[in-house]
Image (cartoon, helix red, strand yellow):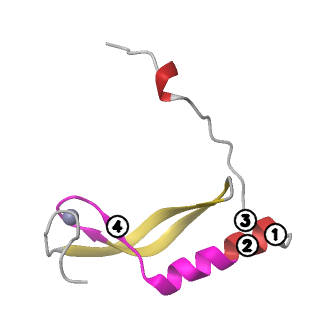
Amino acid sequence: MNICHFCGNSNFKDTVCEYTYKRDGRMLFVENVPCRKCGFCGETYFLSENLRKIEAEFEAIHYHGKKATGEIVVPTQHFADITSVT
Ligand SMILES: [Zn+2]
């Protein structure tokens, strides 16, 4: 990949990102995933092999009883219920 699909920029930074995998109403939040980040718009790109690893880990945790490193509780909100603070 040489050009960002979103903005056309060609400068990328190799870094680590967070990746949230969702399927069937379940989620797996993965930290420190190697990624390339667009230097202009910040869009992140992941290697397909890493996404396959995350998918396999999601299945291991949600369907085969593997214990995850940790768990977080995330508040949820409907947009219509958000009241303006201005
Ligand atoms: Zn970009």
Residue 19 visible, this orientation: yes
Residue indicated by mark 1: 63
Q: Position of residue 26 (x, y in %)?
A: 69, 56
Q: Which residue, as the protein is rendered here, is positioned at the far top?
A: 86
Residue indicated by mark 4: 44
Label 1 crowd bin: few (<14), some (14–19), many (20+), radius 10 Å:
few
Q: Three-letter amino acid code at disc 4?
A: Thr
Disc 4 to disc 2, C-alpha distance: 23 Å
| Highlighted range, magenta | 37-56
The answer to which of 3 and 34 lies nearer the viewer is 3
Q: Decide: marks 2, 1 in contact (CB < 8 A)?
A: yes
Where disc 2 sits, the SS reads: helix
Where disc 4 sits, the SS reads: strand
Which residue does the image show at 51% across and 87% down from the upper left?
A: 49
Q: Is residue 20 magenta?
A: no
N-term-proximal mark, 4 vs 2: 4
Label 2 crowd bin: few (<14), some (14–19), many (20+), radius 10 Å:
some
Where disc 1 sits, the SS reads: helix
Which residue does the image show at 21% across and 58% down from the upper left?
A: 41
Residue indicated by mark 2: 59
